[in-house]
Image (tube, rainbow, N blue to C red):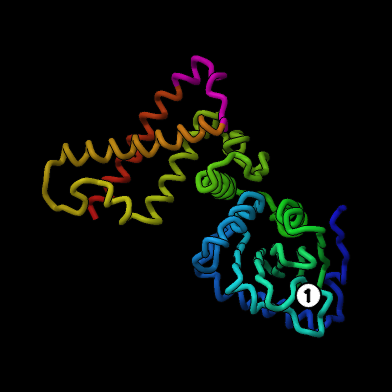
Amino acid sequence: MEPTLSGAGQAGDKKKDPRIVRWQAGLEDVMALFQPDLQKGRLTPVCPLETQDLPVFKAALERVDLSPGLLAAFLPPDSANPIRPPDSMKELDRIEKGKPSYKIIILRPGKEDRLLCAEISEHAHRPGVDIFQSGIFLGKYDYDTHDVCVQELTKAVRTHAWEKDKWQPKDYMTYTVNWFERIIYLGTRDVSVDKNCSFFHSPTLIKVDRVDALFLLLYEVLCRRFRQDPEEIARELPGAGEKSGDTAARLSACQSLAQTYLLDLLNLVKTLGLLDFASFTNAQNHGFTNEFARTVEKLSNDLEKIMAK
């Protein structure tokens, strides 16, 4: 059965249901509370996940594709259960009280914020997505099962929240890095992606070839990792933080670790079949060798800066 989308008004309507206005305002308050911990373009849990939450989160992470400016919060039961529409809005009630709720709230910031609230719990009697803007209930998608809901979420996001304005090179960069980080975390290639927006799949988006696109992606992923957890990275380097010592040994350690990081990601790309290395021309193989050495050198320099702090 196809999901149903029913509209309840247009953003330009002058008359607004005060219940909808309050409900959207409440959802926006929830997002404002969690926003400091959210990263644009990434589905982020709002709190540490319990063991039983992980399969739900991973299923959602695999399927929910986000354009680079969207904010998306994954709410496990402890956070999602208290977030319920008023009793006077039964039409938006998707799960019985006392049942464990799993919600995804997606916000597209702008002059008029667009907000999607999805209930994806297997205990929901009506899993689906509700869409709001400017205090207007724009419509909803209802699904037969929570599995179908999760599988179809990206269609709703791309239709109602996806950023349609012209993207800048940094947007393609953010989108592609976010996609690849999902692959690293999940260990599968079956992650939703718009290949027309990924510079890995469409290198011409940023005016490079596929070899350059590969190493640019891996470099950016590792740089983000370095920035997010420099202390953890430093612990993997012998002598990190020491003011004295053998400079040559330190540089060698940085180069060795950079090469290990890069090879690990290249092996993942090969294992998952993300790139057909066998189809490389001689020129591309030569370019691969050069870019590998150049990227190791760049990463090594980045690691050395971490050690110097």
Q: Amino acid at mark 1?
A: Asp
- Residue at the image position 62 percent from the left and 35 percent from the top: 202
- Residue 238 visible in the current orientation: yes
Q: Where does the image place residue 195, in percent across and percent down from the top left?
A: 66, 39
- Residue 173 among magenta residues: no
Q: Position of residue 13 (x, y in %)?
A: 86, 75
SS class of the residue under badge 1? loop
Tell me the quarter of the picture where residue 278 sits: top right
Q: Nearer the viewer, residue 20 or 127?
A: 127
Residue 42 position, x and y percent, is 57, 56
For the point 60% across and 64% down, the residue is: 74
Report the span colored magenta: 273-286
Instruction: Quadrant for residue 104, please give it.
Output: bottom right
Q: Nearer the viewer, residue 241 or 3?
A: 3
Residue at 57 percent across and 36 percent down: it is: 200
15 to 206, vertically: above or below = below
Seen at 37% across and 56% down, the residue is 229
Q: Is residue 205 left or right of residue 160?
A: left
Residue 264 lies left or right of residue 82; in this view the side is left
Q: Which residue is mark 1?
A: 93
Above or below 207: residue 169? below
Residue lying furthest top in this view? Answer: 282
The crowding category of the residue bearing disc 1, from other C-alpha atoms within 10 Å (few below 14, some 14 to 19, many at least 20), is some
Assign the C terminus to one quadrant of the image.
bottom left
